[in-house]
């Protein structure tokens, strides 16, 4: 399903193919209005206790004291000094977060966050193995360094969560250790026996076809071969916040660990909050934490008794509520292209006119960075206030009226008018 805003109301601001890929990384810092930005690729969103602490320490020592989860389950540090690049790189290497200097920006791999934890899906622990194998294969392939920093792999355990993200290359686990391989937004997939090599081959074919003309398969979708297996609509269901029940695994590997699922407002957490998450995971945890592309954190095996402590620290620990599905780009003061401090505006809207329903994304400019996929309410800052769009219906509002308009749109109370 395409994004909610109509093309006429959401003008194209695609990347300039005449320049090099400028996507930031851990070694390539990006200058922003609030200092430099580093983007750390976290394959499968997996972070050990030690790595969680390393991120918290780096945020406090080098940045603005916070680290944020991106819509691809990666991490960003903001407010960095330009001269801290070497210090940051050394911290990341020591923590095992920088295995390759040449390929660090192309390790974009999202995976089903609950794979092997709750008994759903058909992939189970195979997904975690695929993450490791694909990351190692990417870093070992010299040609892969030419992939865009935006190129995304998704490894879905069969439940249709990350498959709904329309990644550039998607593997969907099926029975027998096999997978369905999907490129871009294709409606059909190809059954493959060796999933990781097949995903890597698909990325290499994309590079060959693109010839420097494109960064995403959807831009050359008509040139890519489509499989013969029809794909159903994907649910895109995100992990519910709160306690994740464990139970029997149905195999010989023991019980499922269950755990906790928590959310971060706007995907951001302070160094102390990240340390609290590390403590909840445990120093000797057999499973790493998992960052989700919905800006949450899954803590496999964590004690449910810790949930009140996490809530007291400002983390979201229960499903529903007015903050459910609320996202925003960086906005002012961090982004010079933004027309407004959209995160502050979104927070005020939640307080003034709380609502549940459709996801809503606040954008400071027409690029709409970090917006969700599927059906969503688009709130775009304008010189006079905001433009709120849902299902093709557009309403221009002054800032004082935006909260009420967003609440109505989230509840799908608007109707298309001709």
Image: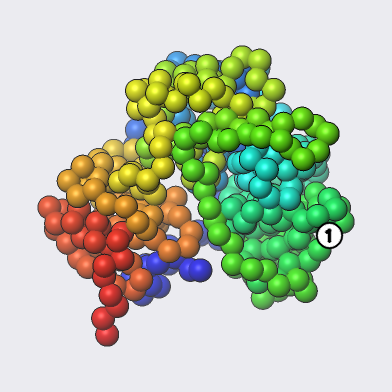
Mark 1 residue crowding within 10 angstroms, few (<14) / some (14–19) / many (20+): some
Q: Quick check: 337 above or below 74?
A: below
> Which residue is denoted by mark 1 in the rendering?
192
| Residue 354 percent coordinates (x, y) | 24, 48
Q: For the point 20% across and 65% down, which residue is it?
A: 396
Element carrying mark 1: strand
Q: Nearer the viewer, residue 369 or 143?
A: 369
What x and y, as percent, mark residue 197? 83, 51
The answer to which quarter of the image holds residue 64 is top left
Residue 200 horizontal side relative to residue 289, left or right: right
Toward the viewer: 207 or 274? 274
Q: In which quarter of the image is residue 134?
A: top right
Q: In terms of depth relative to the viewer, which is nearer, 400 or 257?
A: 257
Q: Position of residue 391 (x, y in %)?
A: 36, 71
Locate residue 40: give its quadrant. top right
Horizontally, residue 220 falls left or right of residue 275, namely right
């Amino acid at each position: 399903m395409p994004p909610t805003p109509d093309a006429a109301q959401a003008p194209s601001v695609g990347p300039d193919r005449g320049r090099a890929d400028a996507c930031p990384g851990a070694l390539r810092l990006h200058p922003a209005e609030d200092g430099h930005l580093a983007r750390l690729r976290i394959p499968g969103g997996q972070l050990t206790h030690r790595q969680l602490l390393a991120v918290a320490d780096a945020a406090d020592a080098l940045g603005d004291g916070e680290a944020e989860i991106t819509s691809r389950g990666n991490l960003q540090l903001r407010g960095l000094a330009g001269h801290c690049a070497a210090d940051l790189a050394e911290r990341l290497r020591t923590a095992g977060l920088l295995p390759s200097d040449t390929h660090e920006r192309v390790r974009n791999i999202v995976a089903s966050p609950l794979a092997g934890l709750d008994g759903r899906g058909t992939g189970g622990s195979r997904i975690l193995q695929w993450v490791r194998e694909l990351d190692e294969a990417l870093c070992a392939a010299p040609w892969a360094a030419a992939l865009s920093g935006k190129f995304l792999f998704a490894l879905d355990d069969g439940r249709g969560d990350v498959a709904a993200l329309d990644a550039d290359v998607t593997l969907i686990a099926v029975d027998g250790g096999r997978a369905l391989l999907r490129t871009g937004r294709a409606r059909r997939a190809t059954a493959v026996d060796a999933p990781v090599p097949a995903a890597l081959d698909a990325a290499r074919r994309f590079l060959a076809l693109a010839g420097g003309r494109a960064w995403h398969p959807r831009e050359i979708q008509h040139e890519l071969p489509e499989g013969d297996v029809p794909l159903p609509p994907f649910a895109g269901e995100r992990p519910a916040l709160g306690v994740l029940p464990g139970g029997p695994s149905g195999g010989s590997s023991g019980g499922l660990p269950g755990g906790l699922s928590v959310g971060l407002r706007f995907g951001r957490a302070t160094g102390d909050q990240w340390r609290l998450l590390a403590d909840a995971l445990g120093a000797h945890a057999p499973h790493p934490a998992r960052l989700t592309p919905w800006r949450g954190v899954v803590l496999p095996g964590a004690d449910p008794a810790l949930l009140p402590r996490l809530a007291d620290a400002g983390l979201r620990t229960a499903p529903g509520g007015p903050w459910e599905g609320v996202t925003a780009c960086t906005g002012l003061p961090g982004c010079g292209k933004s027309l407004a401090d959209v995160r502050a505006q979104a927070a005020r809207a939640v307080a003034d006119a709380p609502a549940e329903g459709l996801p809503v994304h606040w954008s400071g400019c027409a690029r709409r960075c970090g917006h969700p996929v599927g059906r969503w309410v688009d709130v775009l800052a304008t010189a006079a206030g905001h433009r709120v769009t849902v299902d093709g219906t557009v309403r221009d509002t002054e800032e004082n009226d935006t909260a009420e308009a967003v609440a109505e749109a989230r509840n799908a109370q608007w109707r298309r008018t001709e």
